[in-house]
Every structure is written in structure tokens, then in C-alpha cells.
Image: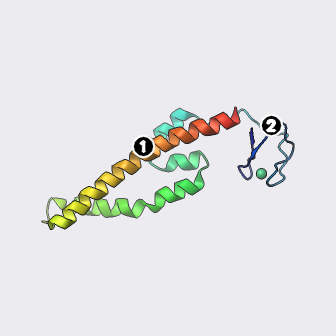
Amino acid sequence: MIRCPKCDFENYDKTEYCVNCGKNLTNIEQTHTFKLSISLILAIILPGISYFYLKQTYKGLMFFALFPLLLINFAFIGGEYTICYPISVKMIISLLKIVLVMLYLFQIYDIIKITKKVNTFLD
Ligand SMILES: [Zn+2]
């Protein structure tokens, strides 16, 4: 498969022009592959950034749309030990923490999956 660099459309091998946008595909370098180690390190240190490395801009933006959740959580953690919140608020904080951990682990899993998939198409 040849991935069109302009629109990301998957074209069959030996296609001269992209079926979707018409870009000339004859001179495209097919040797570039995404390094799993790089996307994995990025995913662990800077969650969400790997999506942009893998050109999954839409998913990256979706991930960062969830950032306000993270900020709210940090704001609560800061006051958790100094202010006595009612039990309902404490439950929400605990729930947010679980959601964030799950989100963090999910993006690592998702990025491994995407990297492998993208590299298969480029091979
Ligand atoms: Zn195209």
C-alpha cells in the first residue's frame, strides 16, 4: 500500500496518482517508518504528543481536549490535604484519578497499535 502524504489515503501499490486527491505518488520515498521506541518514549513522558508524531492530529486534539479534566484534578489534589471536602467531592476526585490513569494507559496502548499499523502500511 502507498499512503498519500497529502491526504493520508491508502492507495494500491503502483498507483501513480492518489485516487482521493490526485497527488503524484511516483516520487514518494517509501523508506520512512515511524520508530516505535520514539512514539513509546513520547507517550510515557509527554502523553498525547505521540499522536502528532504519528500524524494522528485529530486524535491528538481529542486527547488534549481532555486536558481541562487534568487541570481540575490537579487543582483538587492541591487542596485535598488542607481542606476537608465533603465525601461526595472526595469520590469525584478518586473517580477523576482513575479516569486519568486509564486515559494515560490507553494512549500508550493506542500509540503502540497505531505505530505498528502505520509501519505495516509503509512496508
Ligand atoms: Zn491523496
Q: Is residue 83 left or right of residue 69?
A: left
Q: Position of residue 89 (x, y in %)?
A: 21, 66
Give the position of the N terminus as an image quadrant.
top right
Picture residue at 47% right of the left edge, 38% below the top: 41
Pointer 1 local density, CA inside 10 Å: few below 14, some 14–19, many at least 20: few
**Separation of residues labelled 1 and 2 (CA atoms):** 36 Å
Quadrant of the image containing the C terminus: top right
Amino acid type, callout 1: Ile
Residue at x-position 58% and y-position 57%: 58
Residue beneath label 2, please?
13
Does residue 8 appear to the left or right of 24 in the view shown?
left
Residue 11 badge: none
* Dot placed on the residue nearer the N-terminal end, 1 or 2: 2
Q: Secondary structure at mark 2?
A: loop
In the rendering, at what x and y percent does residue 22 appear?
84, 53
Q: Work out whether residue 81 can be spotted.
A: yes
34 or 106: which is nearer to us? 106
Q: Left or right: 46 with respect to 14?
A: left
Q: Secondary structure at mark 1?
A: helix
The correct choice, above or below, for 47 with respect to 61 in the image is above
Residue 91 lies in quadrant:
bottom left
The picture places residue 70, in percent across and down from the top left corner, at 36, 59
The percent coordinates of residue 45 (x first, y second) are 42, 43
Residue marked by disc 1: 45
For badge 2, the amino acid type reads: Asp
